[in-house]
Image (tube, rainbow, N blue to C red):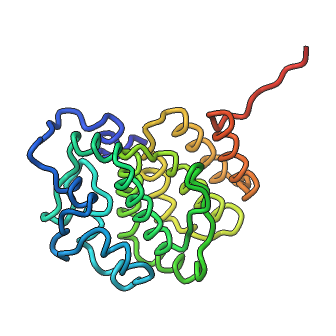
């Protein structure tokens, strides 16, 4: 099955799109200098006031393009597509990266998850996760949001977090039968799992998902071990030892 068009464009770094040096709304927003529209809020205000405001996070459809900008147009036409020059500047600004991390944690909590290790991307369940998992299954527009989140993390040099998210969801599906509907699996297998520009990681995760879909268990122990292995060895692939 061929990859969706938006995924192909993402993996190819959006060929043919030119930088607009006069467009810097995303950079200024994440530097806490520009109010997002139409909510008219600074990023600091959203991060401070919206945590656990699940009604706001569910039914407001304008903020996600500001919190997770990508090089694509979204449904909020008051938000600007991410520009290449913004990516370069945002990746070098530690305060911007810290706010992106906080935005990710905001949405993880909304989805019933929490970040346990920023370096590896390891996730766990949040307090009250069961209700949040149900909401995620019942509100499939969040599947599109997750694709955007993962693409944004990749653009910001935080792609290591994507595997932590994907493999956490896979473990919940495989070992506990949570987050295991056909619709969510489809979004995960066709979109989320391909929001990785690192080809080796994309292929390994794709193969791991395929094995789980065919009935092979992907346990919490395997999840934690795989992230630890990547951190220590630089790869998910287990080393092969041969006798002398």
Q: Residue at x 17, y 56 (%)?
A: 25
Dividing the picture into quadrants, the one containing residue 9 is top left
Q: Is 32 placed above or below 210 here?
A: below
Q: Position of residue 65 (x, y in %)?
A: 26, 62
Q: Is residue 204 left or right of residue 76?
A: right
Would residue 53 be found to the left or right of residue 199 on screen?
left
Quadrant of the image for the C terminus? top right
Give the quadrant of residue 54: bottom left
30 or 84: nearer the viewer: 30
Residue 177: % across, % down:
65, 69
Residue 18, above or below 121: above
Q: Nearer the viewer, residue 125 or 119?
A: 119
Q: Pick out the residue farthest to the left.
A: 22
The quarter of the rendered structure image containing the N terminus is: top left
Residue 35 sits above or below residue 219 on the image: below
Residue in front for this viewpoint, 164 or 120: 120
Total marks drawn?
0
The percent coordinates of residue 236 (x first, y second) are: 64, 38
Q: Position of residue 105 (x, y in %)?
A: 47, 66
| Residue that appears at 38% across and 61% down | 99
The answer to which of 13 and 191 lies nearer the viewer is 13
- Above or below for 100 versus 140: above
The residue positioned 26% from the left and 73% from the top of the image is 61
């Amino acid at each position: 099955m061929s990859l969706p068009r938006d995924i192909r464009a993402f993996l190819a770094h959006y060929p043919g799109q030119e930088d607009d040096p006069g467009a810097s709304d995303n950079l200024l927003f994440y530097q806490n200098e520009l109010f997002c529209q139409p909510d008219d809020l600074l990023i600091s205000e959203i991060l401070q006031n919206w945590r656990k405001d699940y009604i706001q996070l569910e039914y407001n459809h304008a903020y996600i393009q500001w919190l997770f900008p990508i090089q694509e147009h979204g449904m909020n036409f008051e938000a600007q597509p991410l520009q290449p020059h913004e990516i370069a500047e945002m990746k070098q600004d530690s305060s911007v990266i810290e706010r992106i991390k906080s935005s990710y944690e905001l949405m993880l909590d909304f989805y019933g998850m929490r970040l346990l290790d920023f370096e590896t991307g390891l996730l766990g369940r949040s307090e009250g996760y069961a209700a949040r998992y149900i909401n995620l299954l019942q509100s499939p527009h969040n599947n599109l949001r997750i694709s955007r989140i993962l693409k944004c993390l990749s653009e910001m040099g935080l792609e290591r977090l994507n595997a932590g998210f994907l493999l956490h969801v896979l473990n919940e599906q495989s070992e506990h039968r949570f987050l295991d509907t056909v619709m969510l699996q489809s979004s995960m297998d066709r979109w989320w799992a391909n929001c990785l520009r690192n080809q080796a990681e994309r292929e390994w995760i794709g193969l791991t998902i395929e094995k789980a879909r065919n009935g092979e268990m992907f346990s919490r122990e395997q999840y934690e071990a795989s992230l630890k292995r990547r951190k220590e060895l630089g790869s998910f692939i287990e080393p092969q030892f041969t006798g002398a």
